Amino acid sequence: MTRCRIARSLSMSLLTLVVSACGRPPEPIIPQPPVNGDEFVARINQEMRDLSLELNAAGFTYATFINPDTEFLNAKANERYLTYFSKAVAESRAYEEQQLSPATRRALHLLKLSVAAPAPSDPAKRTELAAIASRMEGMYGAAKYCPQGPDSCRDQTQLTEVMARSRNYDELTDVWTGWHATARPLRKDYVRFVELANQGAREIGFTDLGAMWRSGYDMKPEEFTREAARLWDQVKPLYSQLHCYVRSSLQKTYGANHVADDKPIPAQLLGNMWAQQWAEIYPLVEPYPGVNDLDVTAALVKQKYDAVRIARSAESFYVSLGFPKLPDSFWQRSLLKKPADRDVQCHASAWHMDSREDVRIKQCIEPDQESLMTVYHELGHVFYYLSYKDQPYLFQNGAHDGFHEAIGDAINLSMTPAYLHDIGLTGEVKRSEQATINEQMKLALDKIAFLPFGKLIDEWRWKVFSGEIKPENYNAAWWQLREQYQGVGAPVPRTEQDFDPGAKYHIPANTPYTRYFLSYILQFQFHKALCAAAGFKGPLSECSVYASAEAGKHFRDMLALGQSQPWQETLEKLTGTRQMDASAIIEYFAPLMGWLETQNKGKTCGWQ
Ligand code: X8Z
Ligand code: ZN
């Protein structure tokens, strides 16, 4: 299965297909009902795995070569998967009342959750859903902003670069507005997509698609909603302090007419198209200018790192923990560099093509720090795939989806200045209190700034799927949440002609997003546990588990379990606790928080 896809995998038994002699399309043969639940699950595991080959081949080809033909083939592969899925779920009902082993019952539950958007049983609607989903993904991947005709076009990679580097208010506003305008045509498709996917979710027993997504956490969906809210309450004070300090720094750069004391921060000023991670504006907020220059990007450029060398560096971290080297096919089949001559989906993703060892990533790697961190993130997915490849297909997944996102990010936390120095990507790093504050600020601009964004995306979608947010209110509700959670405001007035949620990859791609919110909390729990396993004593922010066999063993043992048991048990095995909890991230950033509180004394914090 793959990350970031509408249908997790595609399946239908090869045994159900016969090729007719006269060349007519093959007719499906309805298989005999198996005798018991165990046999049923064994058959489903086999068939899903078989059909996932086609889904992934079509999906990877589409993502790396967007054109009308690959869009069509991708839609067809998804449609076939969704057909199989509906049939398998319907058949599984016959076993629900039987005496089943815990593993079989769990597999039947996971089967129902194995797509991100189930289709209605009406074949015409299923075809429509698959076509819309495929089209939206391609439109996002191929989108460009062309202010002065076709020769002036810039794609997302180029626009993102401007958002990161420019400090010109008007230029930032223009690029932000131009990119967001590309999402307008997605609105109509999205409205229909919501109707169809909701219908599909209802047919298999969920109240709506959001409730289905929230059922994937080994607790009742309502309980999960409360869990997510609890975690947000835990970290909110960290975010408020960071927001307050960053806003006052930006006011110095852009003036109080653009950045007002008690108002949300204009979204185009935070160094990122979605204002989700702010590390690119570090130079504007650096606490102690010049203390420990951590310019990894400059080092990558100077040493002429190319995409393969960056990916090799990530691989070597995992190998140092005792993971196997990546198979040759990874290097032959991954897309690591943006091709010059065709549209590709540049949003990074990791792929498990065959549920065995054909693992790949697709990423438009550039020689900069963000790409470096993202490759380490993507390889977290890849080493998870390889670690659980011997599990039955339905258990080949993260303990929950937040685990999958947190693996590579936990490794990111081990990429300390000392580690980066060891691999030649920073100069001498002297330890001092000022250095610690600078380093923590840089990391907080990613890790703490992201938290409200990670939370609100699905808050919006949950309400869209439940009908609480109606199409005529999509954009207004989006900005209401962005202001409420992030304290970030629209750069220019918006209307319901706009569809700003569609300018973020995971909306058109229908990838659930709460996984990242959870990951940003869990990764600190993982980091703390790995550091303990490595025998590290000292502040969490100075720990790197690079080359620790002990930490590696703990990590690999956890990954090998996949989704075979409730995540609480898996978490307990690594960390000793059964709860997701923000105390590790709070502990990690304690020095910075003390510093921020002092800096923010007397400032107006918060927003109306
Ligand atoms: O989508 C991703 C990864 C692929 S799973 C690159 N992330 C989220 C995003 O970019 O919005 C990682 C951080 C959050
Ligand atoms: Zn990821």
Image: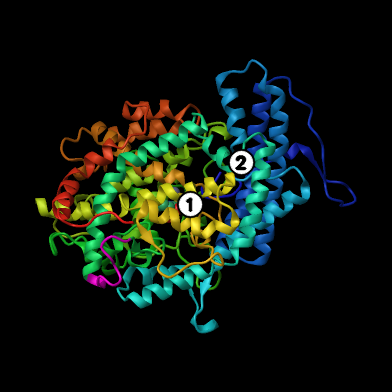
Query: Residue 399, can we see it?
Result: no
Side of 513 where 70 appears, left or right: right
Whether residue 168 is in magenta: the answer is no
Percent x, y of residue 93: 70, 27
Disc 2: CA contacts within 10 A as few (<14), some (14-19) or many (>=20): many
Which residue sits furthest front?
608
Q: Which mark is residue 590?
A: none
Asked where in the image residue 552 lies, by quadrant, the reply is: top left
Q: CA distance from mark 1 to mark 2?
A: 38 Å
Residue drawn at point x = 36 percent, y = 35 percent: 555
Snapshot colouring: rainbow
Q: Is residue 143 above or below residue 325?
A: below
State which quarter of the image contains the C terminus. Answer: bottom left
Percent x, y of residue 604: 22, 57
Q: Earlier in the sequence, mark 1 or mark 2?
A: 2
**Would you say the magenta stretch is mainly helix, strand or loop?**
loop
Q: Nearer the viewer, residue 314 or 515?
A: 515
Q: Which residues are magenta?
A: 253-263
Residue drawn at point x = 71 percent, y = 47 percent: 80
Q: Which mark is residue 330?
A: 1
Q: Nearer the viewer, residue 17 or 120?
A: 120
Question: What kind of residue is marked 2?
Answer: Asp
Percent x, y of residue 373: 34, 54
Q: Nearer the viewer, mark 1 or mark 2?
A: 2
State which quarter of the image contains the N terminus. Answer: top right
Q: Is residue 26 above or below residue 207?
A: below
Disc 2 target residue: 208
Disc 1: CA contacts within 10 A as few (<14), some (14-19) or many (>=20): some
Side of 448 where 518 appears, left or right: right
